[in-house]
Amino acid sequence: MDVLSIVHGEQVRAGVFGDAVEARGHRIDEWSVAWRTSPPRPVEDYGAVLVFGGAMHADQEDEHPWLHEEGLLLQRLVAARKPLLGICLGAQLLAKASGAHVGPAREPEIGWFPVELTAEAEDDPLLGRLPSRFDAFQWHYYAHDLPAGAVELARNELCTQAFRLGNSAWGVQFHPEVTLTQIEGWANEDEPVPEGLLDETRKRIAAWNELGRNLCDAFVDVAEQASASSRAKSSSVTRA
């Protein structure tokens, strides 16, 4: 199975998610709508799509016109029930493409903040694998409303932290994919950062990366099941 990684900058890439996908024997292709090139394969041919973060904001289409195109792409993927997981900006773009308001949060979250799963997350294929409460690594200035028909899976005092659309699309506001190298790069680009952030992160990152790999592993499970179901249907049609 091939997985498409949609990125929005050099410092916001697949991180430990890429390792988790490849450890399962799958290939991950990286692409950005902003590159103005075609993806390595037609998007519909991928077994799953990951959409990562970025320094831009979801409402900055005047500055980044390609954001509109990406929104249309996400709408197509949701309608096609393609397994899809959006991270931070990716979650905000998914929410926006699904009709929800996205805008500046009451305050930014940069660093480690508590997150609590909702009751609906208990039997969710992805979030159900996570602890009911945990400190999550965050780096965002925007938040989003819950799209119509979506299920809220996690939240904290500031905003929705995770949601599911149907049975194939998820968005998480925190950064389960991020590595220490990525965080250090962000800290160098975005000054000032909270005092002690990097020291705290160095102590926490190993456990956090394990959580991220578990979450991505759950997403790959969903994608593999969807891919197997699609092949079975195709085979049945061919025999008929």
Image (spheres, rainbow, N blue to C red):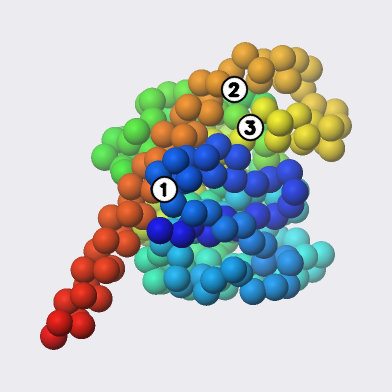
Left or right relative to 152: residue 66? right
Is there any visible trace of residue 208 in the rendered image?
Answer: yes
**Alpha carbon of mark 2 to alpha carbon of mark 3: how far?**
7 Å
Q: Position of residue 43 (x, y in %)?
A: 51, 70
Q: Residues within 10 Å of mark 3 (few under 14, many from 20)?
A: many
SS at badge 1: loop
Which quadrant holds residue 111?
top right
Q: Residues within 10 Å of mark 2 (few under 14, many from 20)?
A: some
Is there any visible trace of residue 135 in the rendered image?
Answer: no
Amino acid type, callout 1? Gly
Amino acid type, callout 3? Thr
* Residue occupying image coordinates x 55% and y 21%: 206
Left or right relative to 189: residue 101? left
- The residue that disc 1 covers is 25
- The residue that disc 2 covers is 205
* Residue occupying image coordinates x 28% and y 55%: 225
Labels 3 & 1 near each other (Cβ < 8 A): no
- The residue that disc 3 covers is 179
Labels 2 & 3 near each other (Cβ < 8 A): yes
Residue nearest the observer in this picture, 76 or 57: 76
Up/down of 38 relative to 82, above or below: below
